[in-house]
Structure formats: structure tokens, C-alpha cells
Image (cartoon, rainbow, N blue to C red):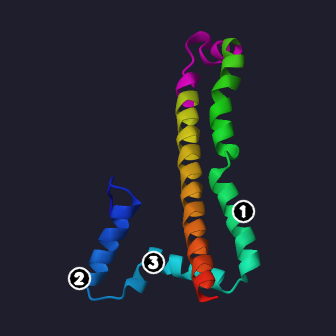
Amino acid sequence: MFSLRGDAHKIYLKLKRASNKEQSFQSVKEINQIEQIQNFYITIDSPTLKKIYFCMIKEKNGSGMIPLLVSSGPWLLLLFSEQLQEFLFKEGSLLWIFFVFAYIFILTLSVILHFHEKSWAAVHIEIIDEILQARKTIN
């Protein structure tokens, strides 16, 4: 199923399809994944879970290596731009085409990976926060 609407809409479509087929929502992979994460975190004691929560916040808010590499890459290329131009454009070489495609591919992959990891950190933070809040109201 190809859609440009994003993961939220894709999950909605999977849930709708499961509902139309009268299947359990547990058959949807994403729902099952979240349940496994919840079940794991429930088994961890609150002080340790709070520390994990802080680690996840650090992960979500941290700049990380990928944005650092993405932002520093162009500066590095600029630093060596004269040598790079000589190498890529010498004597009618088409090497620059490969370089441009490789650079754009790596840049795109890095940005996608960064936001994917950031979104997973947000999911873990919400799950942990919900468990800690539920334990606080019980005690």
C-alpha cells in the first residue's frame, strides 16, 4: 500500500481494513509493537523507569550525530571545493553525477533516519510517562 499521507494515515487504513475483515486490532503490526513495548516497560520498577524516561528525553532532544553530520558535510565540501571541483569536472568526467546522487541519497537517508529515531523516542517517552502516571495515581 503506497501512500504519501504518512504513517498515521497508513495505520488508520490498516486498522480500518482489520475492522472491515472483523479481525482483532492486535493483528495490526504497529499495534502489536506498541503493546510489546508497554508490556516490557510495565515489568520495570518505577525508579529505573524514571531513569529510562530521562534517557529517552535526552535522545529525543539531543542533536545526535546524524544532524551534526548533515550540517557539517556541506562545510567540509566547501572547505575542499576547489580540489573537489578539479577532481569531479576534469576532462569532461561525469563523476560529478555519481557524486551528486550519492550525496543527495546519503543526506536524504540521514534525515529520514534521524526523524524516525526521534519519533520512536517520543513513543517510548509517552508510554513510560503513562505508566509512571498510572503508578502515581495508584499509590
Q: Which corner quadrant of the image does residue 137 belong to?
A: bottom right
Residue type, numbered disc 2: Asn
Considering only order in the chain, which callout, 3 or 1, is on the residue closer to the N terminus?
Answer: 3
Q: Which residue is mark 1?
A: 55
- Give the residue at x 56% y 23%: 96
Q: Position of residue 77 (x, y in %)?
A: 67, 23
- Give the residue at x 59% y 57%: 117
How crowded is the residue under tag 1: few (<14 C-alpha within 10 Å), some, or many (20+)? some
Residue type, numbered disc 3: Ile
Q: Position of residue 11 (x, y in %)?
A: 37, 69
Considering only order in the chain, which callout, 2 or 1, is on the residue closer to the N terminus?
Answer: 2
Quadrant the N terminus occupies: bottom left
Q: Which residue is mark 2?
A: 20
Element carrying mark 1: helix
| CB-based contact (under 8 Å), mark 3 and mark 2 | no
Residue type, numbered disc 1: Cys
- Give the residue at x 27% y 76%: 16
How crowded is the residue under tag 3: few (<14 C-alpha within 10 Å), some, or many (20+)? few
Q: Which residue is mark 3?
A: 31
Residue 87 forms part of the magenta stretch: yes
Disc 3 and disc 2: Cα gap in Å?
Answer: 17 Å
Work out whether residue 93 or residue 45 is closer to the camera in this orientation and state it: 45
Asked if residue 20 lies left or right of residue 53, the reply is: left
Magenta residues span: 83-98
Q: Position of residue 62 (x, y in %)?
A: 68, 49
How crowded is the residue under tag 2: few (<14 C-alpha within 10 Å), some, or many (20+)? few
Quadrant the C terminus occupies: bottom right
